[in-house]
Image (cartoon, rainbow, N blue to C red):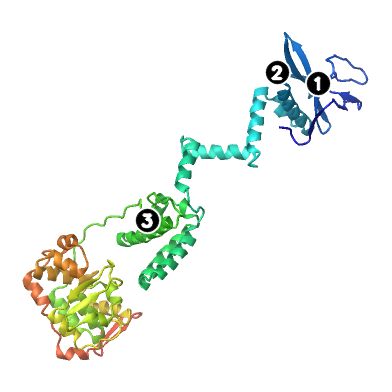
Amino acid sequence: MKTKGAKVDAFSPVMNGCGDKLVTNQEPTVCGKSKKRKHGKPVASVKFGSAVVPIYQLTSAGRKRFILSFYMEGKRERRSFTNLESAKKEAQLVAQRIQSGRQEMNDLRPHDREAYRTVVDLLMPSGVPLVTAVQEYVRANELLNGLPLLTAVDEFSRKARGMKLGVKVKDVVEELLVAKKQDGLSHRYQLQLQSNLRRFAADFDVPISHIRRDQIDDWLRKRGVAIRSRNGLLATIRVLFSFAKKRAYLPVGDVTEAEALDKIRAADVDTEIFTPEQFAKILHAAPPSLIPILAIGGFAGMRKAEMDRLDWNAVDLERKMIEVRAGQAKTASRRIIPISDNLLAWLKPLMREGKIVKDNDFHRQITALAETLKIGWPRNVLRHSFISYRIAIVQSADQVALEAGNSPTIIFKHYRELTTEEQAEKWFSIMPKEEQWENTLSYDRKKRRVILNGIERD
């Protein structure tokens, strides 16, 4: 390969130190004095700019040799080659270095020079400088910790086949939110995804394929939330990574980095329930607006989120059943909950139109009412109470699991033998009082003030 700007022709003179022209195959002239050594006429010469390097042919012991003869830093240099082509390549490089003044490269041995020229020729089609290529190789070798680079590249190429590389987390999140909206998932679930995943995207402004499981784990731990909330965050991140895999932003056949993380197992806690006396006290003090949440929660065991999505048209008092549709249930499967006789008595006097929970603030009013009555409000206490009393009566974890939308294993493990059949009969015998339908409640959330039936309570 000929370097641009270098010419191979008859020899050309260059200037010596005294200002006279100097033929480079001759000894240097010192102020008009010259010592000549005859080599004959060069078979070729290589010119780059004003620098010329001649090539001579000699025969020794019947073998042809091609000799470069030039001066570098005032010293005569000779290099020998067995073929003319190799001599020309070396002459091209020498001429360039003489012209540019980068003489240090000429100090390389011939075989090192040949290796250098080979590497430069290999890199030329890519346009990558030699230094950059070496730097990237060294860094890759460090990251791979001894794994051969080609092995890693082959593995990446296999996994990345068909992938769309470089798609950022924030773009995947927005695509997911649009898809979930098109799929008709509940508004509450969409809001949960939006809240969790946009926070995640704000902290990871990188392609989703760059995120490692340890980074996700660190992010979750830094939230400083309870185990249940942390597991919920991980669940939404898993949804994101699963979606990215389906969209070919991640390797299709591999477990995603989010899926590789395990949920944290929460320690078992005692299941807290109301006594029949406590629940009766709350119900009999409640205004009509709060009765649907209290009665359906305590006597049908519906989850808060399920009740928030429930309409009165799903409550059939004639057939004594509540239908929880697939889109309303946490488990995304339809179930039927029987209406007990006492639940029927609590629901019949109510106006039954539209949403069961007409105002999300009703949940806060209920806990404020319980606190006013000096009764605590443990997490999911109405659902826990229903399941505990229901299994005490029917004595079947399978039946209660169907009604509550849970697994028989969970029912058996957490709710069996928490109460007695006698207490359960009292629970499902709590009936409304005639005068209680006139109850009123006013709640000032900011001042934490409750006015019950016109009387301010502490």
Location of the C terminus (image quadrant):
bottom left
Q: How far apart are marks 2 and 1 (CA)?
A: 14 Å
Secondary-structure class at tag 1: loop
Q: Position of residue 138 (x, y in %)?
A: 54, 37
Residue 421 seen in this snapshot? yes
The residue nearer to you, when weighing 435 against 96, is 96
Which residue is drawn at the image coordinates 71% and 28% (left, top)?
104
Q: Mark 3 points at which residue?
A: 221
Please determine whether, in this image, residue 207 is positioned above or below residue 333. Answer: above
Q: Which residue lies furthest to the right in this view?
A: 32
Q: Mark 1 points at which residue?
A: 43
In the rendered view, does 110 fall on the left or right side of 210?
right
Give the mark nearer the N terminus: 3 vs 1: 1
Indicate the position of residue 105 as horizontal and vertical percent values.
Answer: 70, 29
Q: Can you identify the residue that label 2 sits on?
A: 82
Label 1: few (<14), some (14–19) or many (≥20) C-alpha neighbours in 10 Å: some
Q: Which of marks 3 and 1 is in front?
A: 1
Per the model, the C-alpha gap separating discs 3 and 1 is: 76 Å
The amino acid marked with disc number 2 is Thr
| Residue at left offset 29%, top offset 67% | 332
The image quadrant that residue 228 belongs to is: bottom left
Q: Which amino acid does label 1 sit on?
A: Val
Where disc 2 sits, the SS reads: loop
Taking 344 as reference, is 447 left or right?
right
Residue 277 vs 169, above or below: the answer is below
Q: Residue 75 carries which label?
A: none
Query: Disc 3 marks which amino acid?
Result: Arg
Residue 111, how many percent across, how many down?
A: 65, 23
Secondary structure state at the residue bearing disc 3: helix
Residue 255 appears at what percent x and percent y? 37, 50
